[in-house]
Amino acid sequence: MSQQRNKVRIIGGDFRRRLLPFPDSEGLRPTPDRVRETLFNWLGQRLHGKQCLDLFAGSGALGFEAASREARRVVMVEKSRKVAESLKANQRDLAAGAIEVLGMDALQFVRSSRERFDVIFLDPPYDSDLLQQVMPLLEPLLAEDGLVYVEARHWPEAFPGWKTLRAGKAGTVHFGLLQPDQGKENH
């Protein structure tokens, strides 16, 4: 029954107001509504035709929100089998054909994927070093003018090779939109 008390609400687009259940899982916490609202204001309310990657999908709040807002394709990567199955069930319930759920390790996906994405959502477990591990690997996955959304408990001093376009804080959540720093020197 614990799955039923954990629900995330889609705040905009085609699936607006839909409640999606997700299972109990260590470190799983959906991006708060207020933060998602700010993020999608930054991105523009519609993601029509965009390819999105929700790399540590968890509850799927960011990926389902992107699909709800007309993203052409949303790839959700989730390592936990139980959580990935929940994402697949929600994808079926919404009949969200743009969403593909992959039950695999995020770093493995990044190292093996040859796809390019317009928006990459990064919300790894807070008490991990996954953010530091994955950031240096992302640029080849970004489409031209692509953006990376980062959510973390502690905002790093800097993301080497990246520039922060927008940043905010809501409660204990730090979040921002980043882009590769094209001004960096090539050695």
Image: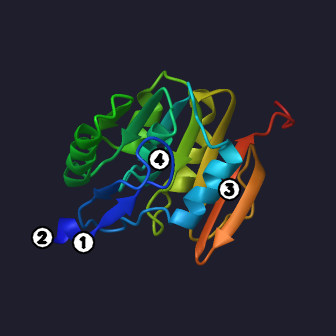
Whole-number angstrom distance, CA of label 2 to CA of label 1: 7 Å
Nearest to N terminus: mark 4 or mark 1: 1
The answer to whether the residues at label 1 and label 3 have Cβ atoms under 8 Å apart is no
Mark 1 vs mark 3, foreground winner is: 1
Whole-number angstrom distance, CA of label 4 to CA of label 3: 17 Å
Judge by depth and name the residue closer to the eye, 75 or 137. Answer: 75
Whole-number angstrom distance, CA of label 3 to CA of label 2: 35 Å
| x, y percent for residue 67 | 45, 38
Nearest to N terminus: mark 3 or mark 2: 2
Q: Please name the amino acid that badge 1 sits on.
A: Arg
- Relative to 28, 122 lies left or right: right
Disc 2 target residue: 1
- Relative to 22, 116 lies left or right: right
Q: Please name the amino acid that badge 3 sits on.
A: Gly
- Which label belongs to residue 56? none
Whole-number angstrom distance, CA of label 4 to CA of label 1: 20 Å
Disc 1 target residue: 5
* 10 Å crowding of disc 4: few (<14), some (14-19), many (20+): many
Q: Please give the count of numbered marks on the rendered protein.
A: 4
The image quadrant of residue 93 is: top left
- Which label belongs to residue 176? 3
Please, what secondary structure does the residue beneath circle 3 have? Answer: strand
Nearest to N terminus: mark 1 or mark 3: 1
Disc 4 target residue: 65
Q: Please name the amino acid that badge 4 sits on.
A: Glu
Q: Is residue 71 above or below residue 179?
A: above
Q: Which residue is at a point 41% across and 56% down the rendered structure image?
A: 17
The answer to whether the residues at label 4 and label 1 have Cβ atoms under 8 Å apart is no
Please, what secondary structure does the residue beneath circle 1 have? Answer: helix
The answer to whether the residues at label 3 and label 2 have Cβ atoms under 8 Å apart is no
Q: Please name the amino acid that badge 2 sits on.
A: Met
